[in-house]
Image (cartoon, helix red, strand yellow):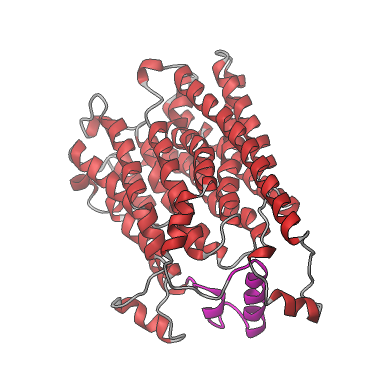
């Protein structure tokens, strides 16, 4: 779902290399305004989407058969496919009508942002119901890897479609690109709407055997998670919003999301500015995403193995700094292209690790959901800025945009060091109060009994 959502979100950058702006009579800042308004819709719907995810389904006929089996009204798994489905028609149907004037383009992008706010932030929360803290980074990395894969697909698809389908049945190639990439997502959303599970304790036998279900519940208890929780605790909402970790991680991820939003939209333009033709730029935008995807999966897997978040974020951010430095220092095309690859390899793992870091260090479904949404909401402010920092007046080197991204990457390094220090200090304080934690084994019956009675004194922050 996220692969196609990312594809539909960023393909406007590929469309720009075709006749997109000419056909829609875009002038001045019209294109940049369309990019910016997506993030406005995305931001305003963040916290509401994760809170509503925890509430009840009352009168949704399409879900009655599904939830009749386990007598459950809970529907956290409903939101991702529903909003995947809802966001597609803005690009997939009646493209000539929707994109007839710039105002309609802006409106379509706004509602696309509103719909996708129910997908990206909800998936980490849904995954946290199933996996332990030290397993989250590699799982979220698989989820976010779809975005980097979408970037590679976007270049290939754009090349094939723009080279072969322009004016086919009277439609411009960029219109065909939106239709072809939007149609499969609608089908995928419909399928997942009925088959994606909620909590381990309500999963059907097709997902988990009775033994697997019991093991999943026990693993959750070990992490301090209760059984399924369909309430919204106002104290947890306030606690999440007043927690410094929420906002520090928001700025850490915000800098990287700013880099990512500008990178995903303007990569074909940046590569073209190196001296390549439009179609060559589409193809050359593929390798950075491939390397970025490989690095994302590898770094996050190591992060789970080492049970560390801060140090991998710092190392990946240093890689991003090196990449933007290469882009800034001159007109040597191979060096610039290596810089593009390094940026992709640095920003993608950092975003995934930031989400995992915040999720790992919040207890309770409500607090975790609000914290993730609030952090993501602020992060998208940076994403909005990222759509504005690469201007034609700064072409062909785009040094201002690269310099802004470089400065925020340095800020990410500074904040990651600070947060890791504060969490380590807090863990030492908890050890002093309650004693060091002992690792317990599920195969030991005595340990198993103790695990079922764990409380907040057994919680330690992940560094």
Q: Is residue 198 above or below residue 119?
A: below
Q: Which residues are magenta?
A: 196-225
Q: Position of residue 302 (x, y in %)?
A: 72, 49
Q: Is residue 197 magenta?
A: yes
Residue 159 occupies quadrant = top left
The reply, left or right, for residue 287 in relation to residue 280 is: right
Which residue corresponds to the image point at 67% horizontal and 76% vertical from the top-left? 453
Which residue is at a point 56% across and 39% down the rendered structure image? 289
User: Is residue 69 rendered to the left or right of residue 334?
Assistant: left
Above or below for 385 versus 366: above
User: Which quadrant, please, contains the N terminus?
Assistant: bottom left
Q: Quadrant of residue 421?
A: top right
Q: Position of residue 275 (x, y in %)?
A: 48, 18
Taking the image as shown, residue 351 lies to the left or right of residue 373, namely right
- In the rendered image, the residue lying farthest to the top is 330
Q: Is residue 321 above or below residue 421?
A: above
Q: Residue at x 38, y 68 (%)?
A: 190
Residue 157 position, x and y percent, is 44, 43
Q: Can residue 186 be seen in the rendering of this structure?
A: no
């Amino acid at each position: 779902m996220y692969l196609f959502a990312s594809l539909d979100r960023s393909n406007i950058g590929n469309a720009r290399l075709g006749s997109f702006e000419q056909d829609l009579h875009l002038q001045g800042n019209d294109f940049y305004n369309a990019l910016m308004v997506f993030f406005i819709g995305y931001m305003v719907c963040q916290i509401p989407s994760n809170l509503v995810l925890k509430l009840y389904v009352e009168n949704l006929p399409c879900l009655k058969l599904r939830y009749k089996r386990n007598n459950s009204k809970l529907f956290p798994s409903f939101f991702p496919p529903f909003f995947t489905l809802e966001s597609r028609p803005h690009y997939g149907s009646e493209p000539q009508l929707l994109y007839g004037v710039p105002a309609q383009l802006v409106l379509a992008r706004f509602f696309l942002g509103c719909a996708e706010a129910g997908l990206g932030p909800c998936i980490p929360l849904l995954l946290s119901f199933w996996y332990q803290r030290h397993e989250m980074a590699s799982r979220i990395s698989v989820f976010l890897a779809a975005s980097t894969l979408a970037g590679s697909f976007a270049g290939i698809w754009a090349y094939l479609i723009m080279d072969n389908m322009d004016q086919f049945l009277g439609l411009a190639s960029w219109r065909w690109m939106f239709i072809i990439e939007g149609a499969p997502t609608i089908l995928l959303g419909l399928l997942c709407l009925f088959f994606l599970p909620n909590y381990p304790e309500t999963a059907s036998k097709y997902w988990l055997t009775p033994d697997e279900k019991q093991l999943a519940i026990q693993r959750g208890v070990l992490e301090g998670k209760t059984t399924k929780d369909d309430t919204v605790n106002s104290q947890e909402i306030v606690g999440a919003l007043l927690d410094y970790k929420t906002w520090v991680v928001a700025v850490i991820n915000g800098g990287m999301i700013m880099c990512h939003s500008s990178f995903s939209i303007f990569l074909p333009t940046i590569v073209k500015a190196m001296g390549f033709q439009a179609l060559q730029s589409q193809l050359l935008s593929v390798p950075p995403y491939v390397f970025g995807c490989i690095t994302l999966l590898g770094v996050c897997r190591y992060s789970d193995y080492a049970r560390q978040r801060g140090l991998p974020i710092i190392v990946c951010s240093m890689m991003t700094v090196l990449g933007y430095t290469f882009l800034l220092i001159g007109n040597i095309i191979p060096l610039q292209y290596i810089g593009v690859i390094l940026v992709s390899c640095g920003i993608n793992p950092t975003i995934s690790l930031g989400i995992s870091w915040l999720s790992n260090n919040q207890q309770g479904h409500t607090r975790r959901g609000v914290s993730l949404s609030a952090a993501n909401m602020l992060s998208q402010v940076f994403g909005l800025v990222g759509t504005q920092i690469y201007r034609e007046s700064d072409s062909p080197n785009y040094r201002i945009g690269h310099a802004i991204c470089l400065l925020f990457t340095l800020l990410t390094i500074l904040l990651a060091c600070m947060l890791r220090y504060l969490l380590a200090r807090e863990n030492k304080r908890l050890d002093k109060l309650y004693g060091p934690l002992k690792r317990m084994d599920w195969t030991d019956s005595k340990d198993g009994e103790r695990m079922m009675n764990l409380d907040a004194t057994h919680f330690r922050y992940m560094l």
